[in-house]
Image: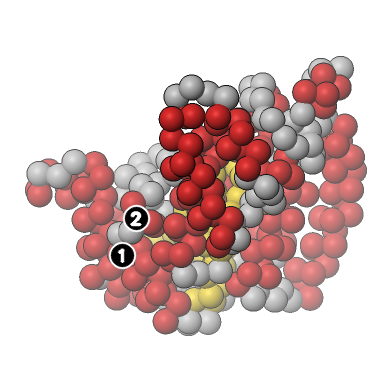
Amino acid sequence: MNSFGQLIIGPPGSGKTTYCHTVSKFLENMGRKVAVINVDPANDALIYKAAVDISELIKVEDAMSSLTLGPNGGLMYCMEFLEKNMDWLMKQLSSYKDHYFLFDCPGQVELYTHHNSMKNITANLVKYGLHLCAVHLVDAHYCSDPGKFISALLLSLSTMLQLELPHINVLSKIDLMVQYGDKVQFGIDFYTEVLDLSYLLESLDENPITRRYKKLNTALVSLVEDYSLVTFIPLNIKDQQCLLRLKNAIDKANGYIFGSREERNVHSLLSSAVGAEYEHERTGFVRDAYSDEAREYDADFL
């Protein structure tokens, strides 16, 4: 097998299933043959047609009832079971030659930080010739809280080191930050480029509770800065320009080269996205759109 694909990961509620549904249609419009693989045995509300569904192999409810496990334990057992039955997965994937794969993965963060099953599963997929890029979705709402954002940085860094794959971190639902009035202290570039985090420490010092953990927070921030690996790409799933930029970053990460037909379709989408980007800017969903000044400006249009 010599195919390409994305491993869609992230905490529960970060938008993985919606991402798979939207991006599969987006890539199909470009001319790619796309197969969405559901690797989450607890996902019983699929909004896309899964080419392969892990629930045909094992269901988390069965694991929980037969082994007396809780939801997290049942999910981990399912991943371990899939790891031991990679032949089943590879046989399923072999039916989709020349397809681009989107793997919709479970949301439990333990699977990507210290549990080895997902790491071993992806390693086997790579061994069989699948060029994967991990796409890690993080809810942009975390930018509104310095403590949550530092946690998101640590989660992203741990996942990058654990999976050992080409890796793209994404701030999902960036458009909802304005819609729900989430306030951030700095321009969006501060969060996407992960700039000087000492400013976040100053914000934490203003809170009497988090101030008590100043040394711990300083050490955590220093760890992220020392590795200097984590950056984010902002994503509004409804914006074609955002989807194009993210697609280009992912293709570069996993080495995907599209054919001439797809290249023509990309140019067509880029041309149509020029007007869309103007509207995007007009309503404020752009760089620094989340400052108080920009929000006041947006109020005239929203």
Which x, y percent locates residue 73?
21, 48
Residue 26 position in % (x across, y down): 67, 54
Foreground residue among 175 and 57: 175
Give the amino acid at mark 2. Answer: Leu
Give the mark, 2 or 1, whose residue is nearer the N terminus.
2
Residue type indicated by callout 1: Asn
Residue 98 can be seen in this image: yes
Q: Give me the residue at 25% from left, 54% from top.
A: 76
The part of the image, by quadrant, that contains residue 199 is: top right
Q: Quadrant of the C terminus?
A: top right
Of 134 and 152, which appears nearest the observer?
Answer: 152
Vertical relation: 61 (above or below) 87: above
Residue 202: horizontal and vertical position, in percent? 61, 33
Label 1: state its secondary structure.
loop
Say the numbered circle drawn on residue 111.
Answer: 2
Left or right: 232, with 1 as reference point:
right
Task: Using the image as rendered, state which of residue 82 and residue 199 is in the foreground.
Answer: 199
The structure residue drawn at horizontal position 42% and vertical position 81%, both measured from the top left corner, is 127
Local secondary structure at mark 2: helix
Residue 198 appears left or right of 128: right
Q: In screen coordinates, is 57 left or right of 131?
A: left
> Is residue 60 shown to the viewer in this render?
no
Q: Is residue 283 left or right of residue 183?
A: right
Point 72% across, 63% down: residue = 248
Residue at 55% over, 39% down: 149
Percent position of residue 60, x then y: 24, 48
Per the rendering, the mark at residue 116 is 1
**How crowded is the residue under tag 1: few (<14 C-alpha within 10 Å), some, or many (20+)?**
some
Q: Residues within 10 Å of mark 2 (few under 14, many from 20)?
A: many
Cα–Cα span, label 2 and label 1 = 7 Å
CB atoms of marks 2 and 1 within 8 Å: no
